[in-house]
Image: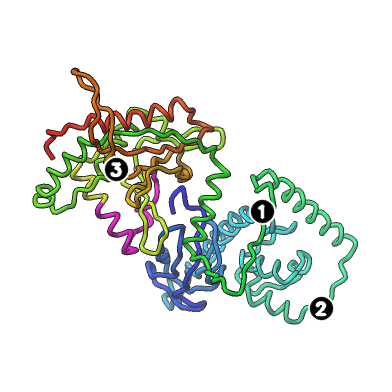
Amino acid sequence: MGESVAEATITTWLKNVGDFIEADDVLLEIATDKVDSDVPSEVSGILREQCFEEGEVVKVGEVIAIIDVEGEANNDPEAKEEEPKIKESALAIEEEIERVAAENQILTPSVNTAGRFYSPLVRNIAQAEGVSSLELDSIKGTGAGERVTKNDILQFIAKKKPVTPSDSGISHLKKQVESVAKIKISETNVATPSSKMVAPIVSGEDEVIEMSRMGKLISDHMTASLSTSAHVQSFIEADVTNIWNWRENAKKDFLKRQGEKLTFTPIFMEVIAQALREYPLMNISVDGNKIIKKKDINLGMATALPDGNLIVPVIKNADQLNLVGLAQKVNDLANRARNNNLKPDDIKDGTYTVTNIGSFGTIMGTPIINQPQVGILALGAIRKVPAVIETPEGDFIGIRKRMFLSHSYDHRVVNGALGGMFVQRVKELLESWDINRAV
């Protein structure tokens, strides 16, 4: 799902347990931070288990379904001879999948001391119903390799009787509790708010509105970014009179010849991509104590949606596109974003983000970094203002088109000198725009 996507929400199961599925059939629908996607089956077979319910959040790498790849009965004699091998291979693959999934379930061990594995669904049910590890071990599984299935554990819970654990069992449980306690203690290293949240007071006339799914994800993403990066801002004002006048003269001919509207966004994207080529240490991400210097310059373009939410489609290899190519990309991504037609590939692999807050009349702002990037540039509104104009004959006051650039960057790896020089270079490139340039 891309390096910036850590989890997804299961919105709809399109197949039921017991259904036969062809390869490439859509199995379920999921929703990530910004995009809804279909998940096709990679194999043909019978859906044996749905490991998560609709509405549950699943981390990337977790098992979401188990498919019996044998499918329907096969009467071919040669195929029957291969059945034991196929079954053994499928069982080995299933064990490996569950082992990997188990390693990701930190607080809920997926394997007991005897080496018995449990699926995420079974473990979740056991945890929710208070089924201990000893009780789970005692359940006779009816699944492949005597695994405990969803029905097995539900039947056990239905007829569950009080169990008095033995001394050895108590000792075993104490060890597990101690292990979980150590893990929970280590989790306190994660940054958390220093003060308790105060619940707002709601009066009888107040309207309570439930946050949308995307709104909740954006909230979590923004909060996580603030707790991850040391945000610092640099502000600079640029004179874009030449760009304004050039676009006014070129936009009609551009639309007639290219069939595309020429907005300010592709012009700014071209300039920012050039600045990133000159300052490659702004085109990086952080992985622990390591810095990953990105080869490609992929510009994220923050786009407001009709429902008030925000999405960031990405222009891949922006530095390799001319102004026509950038205009086509900008218009295409913006239109598909507003019509909810973006694909997962359209919003991943960004290396630097640009947000045009000026389209709402905002002069300047302090944008939040889009993780795992280290910088984001906010473009303020272009205003007609009186300004000092320097000429060989002396200084005078004139009417100019000016705008503020607000640069937020991660002070863990980007110092003030680099952050300031980068945005200064963007200003220089904007102000030196050739008014006689051919489109």
Cα distance between the residues tagged 2 and 3: 73 Å
Q: In this view of the protein, which residue sits in the foreground, 373 or 61?
A: 373
Q: Earlier in the sequence, mark 1 or mark 3?
A: 1
Name the residue: 63% across, 72% down. Answer: 149
Q: In this view of the protein, which residue sits in the foreground, 206 or 186?
A: 206
Structural crowding at the residue carrying mark 1, measured as other residues with C-alpha within 10 Å and reported as few (<14), some (14–19) or many (≥20): few
Q: In this view of the protein, which residue sits in the foreground, 393 or 381?
A: 393
Residue 161, which numbered label? 2
The residue labelled by disc 3 is: 382
Instruction: Tell me where the magenta segment starts and ends, as one range.
Output: 331-350
Q: Amino acid at mark 1?
A: Ile
Element at label 1? loop
Image marks 2 and 1: residues in contact by CB distance under 8 Å? no
> In the rendering, at what x and y percent does residue 89 appear?
52, 61
Q: Is residue 336 magenta?
A: yes
Quarter containing the C terminus: top left
In the figure, 341 relative to 318: above or below? Answer: below
Q: Is residue 170 magenta?
A: no
The residue labelled by disc 1 is: 106
Q: Earlier in the sequence, mark 2 or mark 1?
A: 1
> In the rendering, at what x and y percent does residue 239 appear?
27, 34
Q: Earlier in the sequence, mark 2 or mark 3?
A: 2
Q: Amino acid at mark 3?
A: Ile
Image marks 2 and 3: residues in contact by CB distance under 8 Å? no
Structural crowding at the residue carrying mark 2, measured as other residues with C-alpha within 10 Å and reported as few (<14), some (14–19) or many (≥20): few
Structural crowding at the residue carrying mark 3, measured as other residues with C-alpha within 10 Å and reported as few (<14), some (14–19) or many (≥20): many
